[in-house]
Amino acid sequence: MELKVTVNKNEIQEGSRLRGYADIVIDNKIVIHGITIIQGKEKLFVSMPSRKKENKFIDIVHPINNDTREEIETAILNEFMKL
């Protein structure tokens, strides 16, 4: 899978765990906008675009398996660390 990643860092605001946003292009065929980069308790992680429905958030787009999720997350976080 070929991934092209664009990352924008967010200014760190007190009390916010949001660190940035990412867009990815997959195999020059599909683009996903609005992926967020979040500071967790122990490490950064990637959160796919979601919407709120009945007091919970539901992913609009998500990888089908863990290998794909890890590949996408690694590509995004590697670009984030370059900034």
Image (spheres, rainbow, N blue to C red):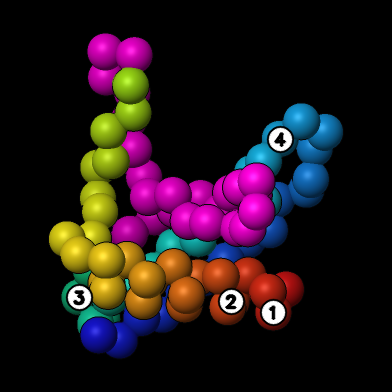
Which quarter of the figure is the N terminus placed in? bottom left
Mark number displayed over residue 29: 3
Can residue 57 be seen by looking at this rendering? yes
Q: Residue under label 4, please give it.
A: 16
Q: Residue at x 79, y 45 (%)?
A: 12
Quadrant of the rendered image containing residue 79: bottom right
Q: Residue under label 2, please give it.
A: 79
Mark 2 to mark 4 CA distance (whole Å): 21 Å
Amino acid type at circle 4 is Ser
Give the crowd class for mark 1: few <14, some 14-19, many >=20 residues within 10 Å: few
Mark 4 to mark 3 CA distance (whole Å): 33 Å
- Image x and y of residue 60, in percent: 25, 42
- Which portion, as a residue range, is magenta? 31-55
Amino acid type at circle 1 is Lys
Q: Residue under label 1, please give it.
A: 82
Q: Residue at x 36, y 76 (%)?
A: 71
Q: Element at badge 4?
A: loop
Mark 1 vs 4: CB contact within 8 A: no
Precedes in sequence: disc 3 or disc 1: 3
